[in-house]
Image (spheres, rainbow, N blue to C red):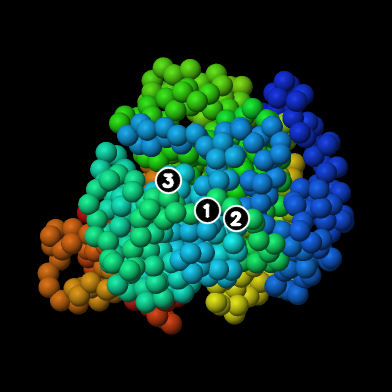
Amino acid sequence: MANESGGRIDTVMHESRLFPPPTEFAASALVGSLAEYEALWRRSTDDAETFWGELAKNELHWFEPFGEVLRWNEPFAEWFVGGKTNLSYNCLDVHLDTPRRDKTAIIWEGEPGDQRRLSYAELHEEVCKFANVLRSLGVGTGDVVSIYMPMVPELAIAMLACARIGAVHSIIFGGFSATAIADRNNDAKAKLQITADAGWRRGKQLPLKETVDAALEESPTVEKCVVLRRVGCDVTMREGRDFWWDELMAEASDDCPAEALDSETPLFILYTSGSTGKPKGIKHTTAGYNLYTKMTARWVFDLKEDDVYWCTADIGWITGHSYVVYGMLANGATTLMYEGAPNAPDEGRFWEIIERYGVTIFYTAPTAIRAFMKWGDDWVTKRDLSSLRLLGTVGEGINPEAWIWYHKTVGGERCPIVDTWWQTETGGIMMSPLPGAIPTKPGSCTKPMPGIVPQIVSEDGTPVDTGFGGMLVIAKPWPGMLRGIWGDNDRYRKQYWEEVPGKYLTGDNARCDADGYYWIMGRIDDVINVSGHRLSTIEVESALVSHPAVAEAAAIGRHDELKGQAVAAFVTLRSGEASEELRQELKHHVREEIGAMAVPDDVRFTNSLPKTRSGKIMRRLLRDIAEGKESVGDTTTLEDYSVLASLRSSDE
Ligand code: PRX
């Protein structure tokens, strides 16, 4: 929240507990002391180009060497200029002449309990075959492939196959609606769609192909569709457009050398909510992303050869891209994928999985941790979790209470916790403890990764004093940074680089304490975070307004014990009467338009909305009302005071 002090934010949180890395953990860690971390960070920022250049040479395979390390034409970065490499090669082929050839790359468990393991050699073979399938369907370098799949190994195979031939994947989370898929397909001009017949979720079949059929009616650029048989249900296959995955694979050769691709070849687009409503296609490219996710995975998770690593994120989000698939495989790690819900068939599923596979590193979201706490300790404590050695969180801030619960109940007080702060745009983790080096404080993401220079600034761009909150910016380019918004360079520049000239605007507020620890304080704008998923107010509002009965709508995030935030919507009607029936209809409508996670928990009908004199809805006031609080903030720009009074008196 901005105030008279130029955007500086006062902090009310005082958390003084400090958890040093356990001695044993530090003794075998890649970075084993604070002094070592500090020396590494200093070296990385004193001469960033030498630092990243050396890592790139040593860690990636180059078909042709790069020249310049960084060409920075603000805000456009090119890393490892002119080099030729291949991400699929760096995740697979590099391991084939080593003992990792037969090491498990992916452990997979389906929701009904089916299990699979793919070694690096097997994964390589599947990826080569599917890359040939893509080619046989006319997909080449630069073509966009839209992927709408459940959490199955074939999703990772499809990604790696795209990367192998230079096709650009655009993965759309399996909970999105047909309209959301079509919007993304059209923005990206996707050529091919990949999906499955259905996926499992809490014992039910999610009809993915049916949703895709509706999306493809509105996606004129998509020519063909590949369908994986996951559950074996009946689906409609359109002759000439739709093809079965297994039938294509049966014909495909497993010989597919990785293409030598320019460092800056687009690798993927991932859509994220923006404050103006239209989803932004965040663009990432090959070499920089490859190096950054590889190095951060190694630093943060302190990977050892025999680790069994499990990140519970869906691959449809950036966490899944970077730390289920690419960052892990580039390090030759064993990564576990689970298809279903944490409470299927019961609330003990995750702990059962950890016990069954001897998971050593567990990376999940605060919203999940809050659910585990609610479900009760017994589900956790009745399983043997002694294999765990490191825990992580991502997606939103973790409150100290949940942190301590995680530490004690899951980690048995022996596992460090890495609270990792980053974004779809940053490609990889930006701030996090290195678990053998940095003592942790519950609720703080601690310190920056090597090469990362965060700053906290006020609205005029000047640094704020230690201990005060302000806007979090990043002062230097880094290899994993987004390269733009797909098809919209202007929006990229405006959104991320103009507000604080020369610095990347994260959109989050944060503060840095006297020990140099960072504390994230939330979004500057109004994006709603439901269970770790960012939803823009405008997207929810647009969905509501597309219903014939609705004239105007405002959506805000109000506090929710379990989900972090729940969506609350304020709606003015164009016609008809406010009724319970209409309320349910509107919720259903949002589900159809955007997906289940955007459905408002509250829908309130009102005659008018509080607005500024220039006509902007004042969401801050609505948030106060939704949470039953008095408005203490500035209301001088409010156009009509009677609106607040009438909203309050209609409180349910
Ligand atoms: O507000 C921050 C919050 O999630 C935003 C990024 O969301 P997204 O692009 O969906 O990526 C999520 C996974 C990387 C951030 O701007 N956020 C993420 N991690 C944390 C966090 N807030 C506090 N602490 C975190 N560890």
Label number found at residue 151: 3
Q: Is mark 1 within 8 Å of ligand 1?
A: no
- Circle 1 packing at 10 Å, graded few (<14), some (14-19), many (20+), is some
- Residue 104 x/y as whole percent: 57, 33
Q: Is residue 453 left or right of residue 233?
A: right
Q: Is mark 2 within 8 Å of ligand 1?
A: no
- Circle 3 packing at 10 Å, graded few (<14), some (14-19), many (20+), is many
* Residue beneath disc 1: 253
What's the amino acid at mark 3? Met
- What residue is shown at x 32% (from left), y 74% (from top)? 218
What's the amino acid at mark 2? Cys
Pick the quarter of the image with the N terminus. Answer: bottom right
The reply to whether dot 2 and dot 1 touch (C-beta < 8 Å) is yes
Q: Quadrant of residue 299?
A: top right
Label 1 residue SS = loop
The answer, for residue 326, to whether it is visible in the render is yes
Q: Front-most of 242 and 51? A: 242
Label 3 residue SS = loop
Distance, label 3 to label 1, CA atoms, is 25 Å
Q: Front-most of 615 and 178? A: 178
Q: Is mark 3 within 8 Å of ligand 1?
A: no
* Residue beneath disc 2: 256
Q: Quadrant of residue 487?
A: bottom right
The reply to whether dot 2 and dot 3 touch (C-beta < 8 Å) is no
- Residue 584 x/y as whole percent: 18, 58
Pick the quarter of the image with the C terminus. Answer: bottom left
Q: Quadrant of residue 63?
A: bottom right
Choose the circle earlier in sequence order: 2 or 3.
Answer: 3
Q: Front-most of 265 and 102? A: 102
- Residue 257 x/y as whole percent: 64, 55
- Residue 37 x/y as whole percent: 80, 39
